[in-house]
Every structure is written in C-alpha cells, then in structure tokens.
Amino acid sequence: MKRLIQNGLMFGNLFHVASPALIDRYNRALKHLTGKTTEQTDFHIDISGYSPEVGDELDDHLYLNHQGVNRQFILLSMDQRTAPLLNAKFSTSRGILKQFFEENEAQLFALTARDAVAGELVNSVYDVSTPARLFDIRTITVEADTTTGTVKDARELARLVGRFKNDQDGWFDDVLIADMITLAGKTGDVVRNPVKLKKMRFDQRDFWTAHFGGLYIFQDVNHPAVIAPSGKDGLGSLPLPFAFDASEPNQIARFFELNGLTETIVETRKGSAAAILRQKMDFILVDAVADQGVDLAGASRADMRRLTRAHGDKLPAEFHALASLVNWAENGGPWPRISSDHPAYFYTLRAADTKNASLVNMLLAELAPKDIRQLFICHKELFYRTYAGWPETKKAYVVDFLATEYQVDKAGARAALFGHDAPMEEPTAQKPDPVSDMIAAVGPWGAVRR
C-alpha cells in the first residue's frame, strides 16, 4: 500500500493534527466519547475524526464506530469536511456528516475556535448481529456538542432568558439571575450570538453496508431488493421479497431495468462513449497480461495495440464484446448483442440520473471489477482490498494511471463517466433512428433474460 500512499491515492487529503492545542482538544473529545486518550503527538484524521495512527495505537480501528453502527465523530476544524471517510461501514455516513457540517458551518466554525465538537450519527440499532437488523435502520439523527457542553448550556441559557423576560418576578429571582450569569460566562451572549446546531434527520432506506460481506439494500424503489454480490447464503429471512448475488446477473439486470436505475454508456451516442469503452478495454487487457512479465510502465496506445496482438489468446470475453461495441460506435459496425448474462454486460452500464446514482455506480463497480478507475472512484474499500492481491506489474500500472491521468482532472473524469446532460432545447424533427428505436423497445442489448 506504500505506493498508493506516496501517490496520494490512499489516506489522501486527511487533516493533519500536530499542534498541542488541537491534540489536547482531540483527547478531551476522545475521552468524552470513548473513555480513551492517545499519546500521539502527530497524526491525521478523516472527516469523522478517525485516525489510522490512533487506531494502531489503541489496537482498535473501530474506536469511533463500535460494532460498525452509530458512528461517532470528532470535529477539530471545518477543513475536515473535505477529507474522506475511512473504514466506512455505510455508504451514507460521509454524505450525512458533510451535509451536517455545511448546514451548521457558521456555528461549528465558532465552536471549533475554542473546543472540539463531539457527536454521533444516531439510529435505533446498536448492533447488527443479523442481516434483518439492518432493516430497522430507518433514519439517522445527528447529535453534537462541544466537550464542555456549550450547545447544551446555550439551550438552557436561552430557556432561562425566556423565563426571565416573561416572569413578572424575574428581576427579583436572585437564583435565576445567578444561573444566567454562570451560563453566560460559558456560552457568551446567546441573544446576540445564538449557539444552536440544527437538528438534522436523514432517511436511510437505500444504502450499502460493509456488514455481511457487503450488501446493497434498495427499499425506496418500485421493486425493492437486496443485492449481495459476494453471496446471499446465510442472510436468513429478510423483510424484502428478493435477494440476488453475483451468480444471478440476469435478475440483477432485471432489477435495474424495472427500477430505471441504469443506462448504457452509449445511450447518447456521443464520441466520448468510445473513448470510455477503449479505456475499459485497456484495464481488461492489463488484468489479462499482468502476470505474463510484461512491462506496462508508460504504455502508450500503440503499446496497448501491440500487447493486444501479442496476447490475443488470453483476452477474455469482456474485451471482445467491448471491442465490438467500439466498432459499432466508431465505424458503423454491426450492433452487438450483449445479453445480461454476458460478462461484459455491466461494463456497458452507468447509473441513470436518479437519487441513487452514487449507490448504483458503486454496485456497478463491484459487478465490473476490472474497470479499476470506476472501482477506485466508486468503491475505495473494495479497491484497496483487491489491490493487495494484484501482481506488482498491475499495481504499478494502476497507480501510474490514477496518479497521472485521473488525479489531474477528477471533476472532468467523473463528468465524462457519470455526468448527465442538462435539459436541451426542444429537438427538431429527425429521421427515425433504428438503433434508438431498438433500445426503446427491448433495452440496449435485447430483452433482459429472466
């Protein structure tokens, strides 16, 4: 993993904690949440305040995420909000934290100027001992305060101020006035500068979880289902009628189709589609030849063509199917028939423009794992696990590609791969397109098999 870290592809953009003041605040928050402290004098934290160095020291990398539920967080600086979330157990956690920080930016900025903010993503489930327990997670509520209880004290002071103003005998209540003065010394003037964090609740109906080998739970769609790519055996009784695993591509494809969750990369027939497909072919080629002693460092397009010719007998069905699709897109070749049980099928899809687009792209990355760029962007946990088992040649190629091509223009790459077109002007009448008619009638590659 050292190569990934050196190129900023792992543990990148973490917040550096090195000053004694921040370390002291971190320890107060850590003690408040877990009863533990750290002896570290220089460490890095993610958006939730989790530190790999502290995790190593405590021999517990779930020290802020006990049993993988109700993730706790420590906020030292608003700069944390751009950091990744490490060891994620739910796909929604980082988005919830980021929204909470953004919605309370001014208040949190003021609070973190003097203290750490400690909090928790709270749901009604405190253990997920069985898969069925995951379905008891309905909403997530964010609770947060400083380690000294500034928000709680401000709420109490506001209540006392209201009582003082509305009670006719307020001016003569020495105890009330004394309590107000004491709290004001801790919180400041809450009348002019109210210290209040928004109560935020988030629905959690569609999500990925790392528990039980990795599950994708879709409840808020027309046709709910659980997708368990690594296998559904052992899940037991679930409250949803359907569960599919990677051995059932036809059923997963049908699930996507019924819920309108995916579209083909070539749906708009733009020239960029061929370039995306060619890049996927390169990744599949590299996977096929990486253990053949081939030097892939700095490989050009001509080098890739040469490798294709030299190792044609080792190229899998995915490569040849995508090549046929590129031939159709660029040269007007025959429309390829790629059925839903073909190993290339999920390589030809991307998420449709729905609220679940990120979750669907994450699932597609797991169903098409040789596309290392999508895997890195959409499912880093799986990327890091699979990276560890790759040949050194493939590791070097992937790191070089991500560092020199993806990292230099992340936004552009994401827009090309996953972005959706803005609404267009009213189209003028055009001649019927037989290929578009075919897509509309029976799906991109013909009727999905059941």
Image: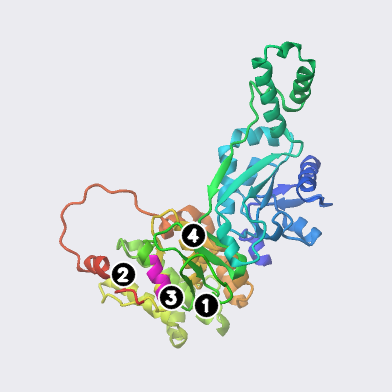
Q: Check if residue 253 falls in the magenta segment.
A: yes
Most distant residue in the right direction: 39
Which sits earlier in the primary sequence, circle 3 or circle 2? Answer: 3
Mark 2 belongs to which amino acid? Pro
Distance (Cα) linking label 1 and label 4 = 25 Å
At horizontal 76% and vertical 61% (from top left) the residue drawn is 60
**Would you call the spot at circle 2 few (<14 residues within 10 Å), some (14-19), or many (20 or more)?**
many
Distance (Cα) linking label 4 and label 3 = 17 Å
Mark in the foreground, 4 or 2:
4
SS for dot 2: loop
Q: Position of residue 350 (x, y in %)?
A: 41, 63
Nearer-the-camera pick, 25 or 314:
25
Q: Is residue 154 visible?
A: yes
Kindly report the secondary structure that dominates the magenta region of the rendered protein.
helix
Mark 1 belongs to which amino acid? Asp
Contact between marks 4 and 3 (CB within 8 A): the answer is no
Q: Which residue is mark 1?
A: 287
Which sits earlier in the primary sequence, circle 4 or circle 2? Answer: 4
Nearer-the-camera pick, 283 or 418:
418
Q: Which residue is mark 4?
A: 359
422 vs 86, left or right, is left
Q: Which residue is mark 2?
A: 444
At horizontal 79% and vertical 23% (from top left) the residue drawn is 182
Which sits earlier in the primary sequence, circle 1 or circle 4? Answer: 1
Eyeballing the image, is 183 above or below 2?
Answer: above
Mark in the foreground, 1 or 3:
3
Disc ID at residue 181: none
**Would you call the spot at circle 4 few (<14 residues within 10 Å), some (14-19), or many (20 or more)?**
many
Q: Which residue is mark 3?
A: 249
Q: Quadrant of the N terminus?
A: bottom right
Mark 4 belongs to which amino acid? Leu
30 vs 363, left or right, is right
